[in-house]
Image: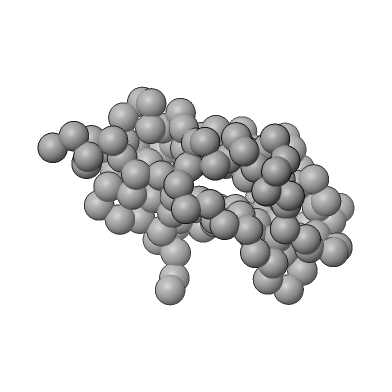
Amino acid sequence: MHPDAEVRLPAETAYVAVLRMATAGIAARLDFTLDDLEDLKMAVSEASALVLADATPGGSLAAQYFLEESRIVVEVSADVAQPTVPDPESFPWQVLCATAADVTATTAGDRLVIGLSVESSTSTSS
């Protein structure tokens, strides 16, 4: 399945803010509330921190967005020398699970991929 949108940046923490803003802009098009947007931005920040912890210098940080009517699925990934999934007991993983649903971690070749989804609260209130 092809993503509806994709952002690719250098694998450096300075670019996480750019990724957060792109994520907010995409989610705003889906009529996410401000609280939903903040949760999504925090989840993308935590996912970015997890994949960048062991990022390969000169590698890339990427986010793929899969859009549904009231839900967004984001896969954040980075090039890493030895991809290993994060410890599910770690604090960053716990924060990620508190701000997003359906959180996953996988490896794909030389990339660590953190998948997350956030549903708009406007879809559950109708």
Percent across and percent down for residue 38 are 46, 28
> What residue appears at the point 61 percent right and 55 percent down from the top-left corner?
114
Instruction: Give the side of residue 20 with respect to residue 107, left or right.
Output: left
Asked if 111 appears above or below 74 in the picture, the reply is below
Percent across and percent down for residue 39 are 46, 32
Percent across and percent down for residue 94 are 62, 38
Could you say which is closer to the camera, residue 112 or residue 90? 90
Instruction: Give the side of residue 78 with respect to residue 66, left or right.
Output: right
> Would residue 20 be seen by someone viewing this image from the given angle?
no
> What residue appears at the point 80 percent right and 45 percent down from the top-left corner?
53
> What residue appears at the point 39 percent right and 50 percent down from the top-left corner?
72
Could you say which is closer to the camera, residue 25 or residue 70? 70
User: Which quadrant of the figure has residue 29?
Assistant: top left
Could you say which is closer to the camera, residue 82 or residue 10? 82
Image quarter hosting the C terminus: top left
> Would residue 94 be seen by someone viewing this image from the given angle?
yes
Percent across and percent down for residue 65 are 45, 55
Instruction: Give the side of residue 88 with respect to residue 117, left or right.
Output: right
